[in-house]
Structures are given as C-alpha cells and as structure tokens.
Amino acid sequence: MSATPVGRSKPAGRLFGLIALAGSFLCACVTAWPSAIVAQQGVTVPDFTIDSKSAWLMVGDDLLPPPSGPGPISFDKRYPYVDNGAARRTGTQPTYRVADLSNPILLPWAREQMRKANEWVLAGKVPFRARERCYPAGVPGWVIYTLAEPIFVLQTAKQVTMINQGGPEVRRIYLNVPHSQNPKPSWYGESVGHYEGNDTLVVDTIAISTKTFVDSYLTPHTDQLHVVERYKLQNDGKAMEVLITVDDPGAFTTPWSAIQRFRRVPRQWTEDICAENNIDFLHYEVMPLPQADKPDF
Amino acid sequence: MGVFWFFAGIGSALTAMLAIPALSGSAYAETPDISGTYWASEYHAKIQLVGGGELPLTPAGKAAYEKNTAGLKDGSITDAARKYCVPDGLPRVLATPYPFEIIQAPPGQVTIIHELNHQVRVIAMDKPMPTAREQTTFPFYNGHSIGHFEGDTLVIHTAGFNEKTFVDATGAPHTDEMTTVERIRRVSPTQLEDVITIHDPQYYSRDWQARFVYNLRTDVRLEDYVCGEPHRDLSQVAGVRRP
C-alpha cells in the first residue's frame, strides 16, 4: 500500500499518526484496499488502479459464456482445446484452437472464413495469434490477449489508460464524452466510457479495424462492430469481471455477450518488448512480425 | 498480542481512510501538474547539444560511432527502432516527432506513453533505484527510472540501459553504463521542456546535455501505431523527411 498519504494524517494528532504509521507497516498485508479514488472534480469513482505495485491478470485466454443468451465461439467438441497451462497440469499435449462452427451467432460468410481457419489448423499449421505476432489485440480481443502478462490501469479525470505489459499494448478510454462524428477505424477503435456506481467502468467502442479478430478463434467482424465492456470490481477489489456485449449485424445473426475475469496480482512494471522476440517461429509458416521496409521518418 | 493487532488494525483503517481524500485524478493533490499530451514542432536526426558543438566522444566512443554510421550505411547494422519498432531508448526517444502523453498515475508513478512504437516509460516516484545487480540482470531499452519533484520540475534519474539503442538517429553510441538525469518542467502554460544530462564516461569525455521542447496539445489524441503501416501526418513537424 502506498505509504505517501500517511504523512497527511496531521488532523488526527501525533499519537494517531504514529499508530497509523505503525499499523500501516505492520498490517499492510491485511489492510482493505481503498475501493474508490477521488477524481479531480471531487467525485468518487471506482478504483481499478489501486497503486503502482499491482496489476490485473487474466484468468484465461478465452471468452467465457454469459449467464444467459447467445454466447461467444468456443472450441469444436471433436477437437478439445488444451492451453499450455492445462497441458502442463494434466501432462497432455497443448493444442491449437479449432472453432465450433455450429454456433448460431455466425453469419454464413463469417462461418466460411472460419472454416478455412479451422482447416489450416487441422492441416497441422500454426494459426495466427495477435500476441504471438506482435499485432494489437483489438476490442474485445484486448481482454483475452495474453495469459502471462499483466494489465495496468491508469485512471485520471478525463481518461482511463490500460497498458498490457506484453508488447506493450496501450488503449485509451475517454471519459464522459460522446463518440466522434466519423472516427477513423483503428486497431483499438474509439473508446468512450463512464463509471457506474462504485464498482463499474462502462466502455463503449466503435471504429475497430477489420484487421482485428473478435476472439482467439479468429472470428471476423465488419466495420459495424460495436462493443460494450462493463468492467466490475469484485471481492473487495481483488477480482474484476468484464461483461462484454458484441453487436455486428454484418458478421453475426444476433448481438451476443461474453465474460472474462481478472485477478489482482502484486506486480511491478518490467519491459517486455514483443518485437524483439518471435522473429522466427521454428520455421513454421506464420504471419511475419510487423516491420517497416523503409524507416517511418 | 491482541493490543498490538488492535492498534495495527486501527492504524491501517485510519491510513486507508485518510489516504482516499489525499488522492486526486492525477496523482497527489500537492504535486505539480505536468500531465498532458505533448508534441514537438521540430525534429533533428542528429542530437543537438546544449551550447552547441559536437559530441565529446572519447577515442572508444569515436570508434563506436564510426562503426555504427558505417554499419547503418552498408546495412550490416539495422536500426531496429525504425525497422522492427522496438523502443528508441534514451535520449533518442525524446527527439520523437510523434506526440506523447504524460500521465501522473497511478499514485506513486509518472507514466510517459509515446505514440511512436507505443513505448511506455514508467517513472517510479515512490521507490528507490533498482540495485546495480537488478539493472544489469534486467537492462531495459528505456532504462530504469526513478523521479521526484524539485519545485515545479520533475527530476528523473535513469540507469540500467541495454546496449541495443542509439543516442540519436545517426547512430551515436552509448554503453550500458550510461546514466541520465532529466529535468522536465512547464516553461509556459503551453510548453514543456526536458533537459537531459548524459553521463557515459566510457564513450564521452564529459557529461553533456540536450534540450527538447514540446507543445501542449489538448487537441490531439494519441493514435495506435503498428510498424510499417501508414501513420499520422508529420508535415507540421519541421525537419521530418519521410522516405
């Protein structure tokens, strides 16, 4: 816990100050984390940041089904997906993802494109993963980008900045403003947001580049994609759940929703530069890393 | 033991209660506010020394510089920051012709985020410099930085660099023993100044300084940046020549 505010405890008197100081050092491990921060206008908002020494880790790298209603693409039951962690735990071989094409959310063109992606994997080839090839995650791919790398959340009065240490990747959410008239499509789109209650950040994103995929199964989308993420603190700020709704009449038969969960971990920033790794991927046929044949300037 | 935990508990609760109002949207209420989006109006491939003149290279530094310039010219050395978009490192990143953000959050940290190569610099305001062992075990492109305010000036000490970066776009060299001190402040309501002092005695016979000035740009939002794609128009930045 940040020790800096301790020095501001003057009104409570020296004795209380000393007790507070001692208590904060002796009992930091059991202290309840403040659940709210006060933005510049003096409004209390949910605190997703906590301090400079903690971050959020994804509990998995697949979108989870919602409590009810149409849900995200999962794996084809004939080809169960085993991630690296599960493979280690169970002593089995990890697999690449083969999408369940029977999911009724898919429009025919999207299903056909994914059939080809499935055939690629079933032919023994390595599927594209944005994180492995140092491409941006997109939205909602942001919430399933990587298992191992933490996300840091920076909250200021007008903006929430989320940084995935792996890459690093950065996305920005502009608070309490409307969308632009004609936002230019980009990898993370245009995100605007607001807080709801004392535990939720709502993020509305449009203008997401069609170069991104919606999930780890290479589910495509069109320029009509509209994503709403509701980040909600849980368990005294030790956990966070995001409820995602995805609407794209160009790719899906219906709006659908999904869940992702995060846990708060003690973590300090370290440089983790994607572009210096993964240049050659064991000679497999994979997407080249982004590079500039001519320098930008 | 019970009394001990009772007091400890009260202390923690008080600390937590008192801590909340002390925080503001951009770090601590009493901290000078240098946050914002900034953008330089000029770009120099060759680093400009305060007071003018040439880099005070030692013989070893001169040899390293000549090797770099020759290698960049014949292609035997790659400018990885431009070709693969790895971080530019200090002080080269300060010359960026792209906008960047200074965010005074989370509490105890100043975060500098560049549009160019989406580089992130984390300045720890509440921690000591990592030990020499940590610096050499985990050298960073942008080094390990700690900061504090002196009046209205943010002073950043950085050490623990890797040797994969250049001092500037011409290939001026540095060693992994380089250390830097930056003094960053608002010189007017709309301008930010960063004066950096370079200390690298293997390659430079004396400490030297470079000064960078940026305009506060409330009208600019940072954009996504992926290597090799077309990026934002830089025609308003003097000195930028796109191939």
Image: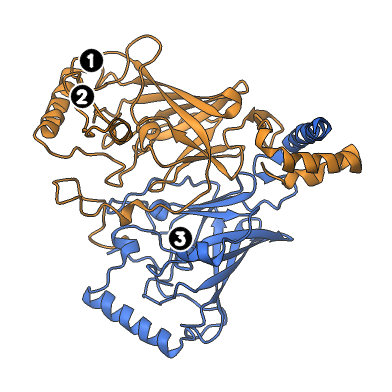
Chain colours: A orange, B blue
Q: Report the residue marked by disc 1.
A: A103
Q: Nearer the viewer, mark 1 or mark 3?
A: 3
- How much space separates mark 3 and mark 2, taking CA atoms? 39 Å
Q: Are marks 1 and 3 on the same chain?
A: no
Specify the subunit that label 1 lies on.
A
Q: Are marks 3 and 2 on the same chain?
A: no
Going 38% across and 59% down the picture, which residue do you hit?
Answer: B235
Kindly identify the amino acid type of the residue bearing the numbered disc 2. Answer: Ala
Does dot 2 land on a helix, a strand or a loop? loop
In the rendered image, the residue lying farthest to the left is A123
Q: Are marks 1 and 2 in contact (CB under 8 Å)?
A: yes
- How much space separates mark 1 and mark 2, taking CA atoms? 9 Å
Where residue B79 sits: x, y (%)? Answer: 31, 67
In the rendered image, the residue lying farthest to the front is B1
Going 22% across and 24% down the picture, which residue do you hit?
Answer: A80
Does dot 3 land on a helix, a strand or a loop? loop
Q: Nearer the viewer, mark 3 or mark 2?
A: 3
Q: Report the residue marked by disc 3.
A: B138
Q: Is residue A230 visible?
A: no
